[in-house]
Image (cartoon, rainbow, N blue to C red):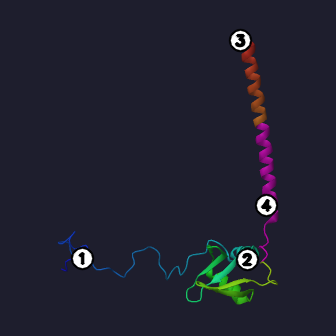
Amino acid sequence: MPLRTGYLAHFSPNIPATAMSTASTSPYDKEKFPGAAPSVSTEKWLNYIYRKLQKGYYLIIGEQRKIANFYRGYGEMEACSYPVAKKLLDRGELEPVGKHFLGTMYRLKSEAQPVPPPASTSVEDEEETDLALAEEAEELEEDLLEDLAEDVEDDEDILDEQT
């Protein structure tokens, strides 16, 4: 049984060291779930990138590491999705501007246009829902007005009895 050695040996000299296991005890299995679902869609990221670049930001895409950042000068940096930035670069919608210590700086080409947002597929359902909610709101308002009128009448009756 090996004893602890090194920096923390004097704190627990009689407790044996345990070997680190390479077997994961996490409930997350990489083979069953190869990657987590993105919380923001690619289209939303693309629109966000277009808006940032149209405001004057530069997009820095790393050459050695898989990183992407927005840059505006004076140290203003903001993280960006690397796969989406790389996709935009592969499409040819970015032109290189210069070098940065994090990678190459790009700006949006003048002919590049933002991706239109996806069309809503259930417009009729939304209209029906809006109508139902409006009807419920009207009914609630009528009920509240009736209750208020009854309360006012009760208060007037109490005042009349007191005088």
- Does 139 appear in magenta? yes
Q: Earlier in the sequence, mark 1 or mark 3?
A: 1
Task: Say which residue label 3 marks.
Answer: 162
Q: Amino acid at mark 2?
A: Leu
- Does 64 appear in magenta? no
Q: CA distance from mark 3 to mark 4?
A: 54 Å
Q: Earlier in the sequence, mark 2 or mark 4?
A: 2
Q: CA distance from mark 2 to mark 4?
A: 34 Å
Q: Amino acid at mark 3?
A: Gln
Task: Say which residue label 4 marks.
Answer: 126
Image quarter of the C terminus: top right
Task: Say which residue label 2 marks.
Answer: 53
User: In the rendered image of this protein, does residue 39 appear above or below residue 145?
Assistant: below
Q: Which mark is residue 45?
A: none
Task: Say which residue label 1 marks.
Answer: 17
Secondary structure found at label 4: helix
- Where does the magenta region start and end? 115-143
Q: Earlier in the sequence, mark 2 or mark 3?
A: 2
Secondary structure found at label 3: helix
CB of mark 2 within 8 Å of CB of mark 3?
A: no
CB of mark 4 within 8 Å of CB of mark 1?
A: no
User: In the rendered image of this protein, does residue 137 appear above or below residue 52?
Assistant: above
Label 3 crowd bin: few (<14), some (14–19), many (20+), radius 10 Å: few
CB of mark 1 within 8 Å of CB of mark 3?
A: no
Q: Which mark's residue is nearer the viewer, 2 or 4?
A: 2
Which residue shows up at 51% across the image and 80% down it? 32
Q: Picture coordinates of residue 138 (x, y %)? A: 80, 44
Q: CA distance from mark 2 to mark 1?
A: 54 Å
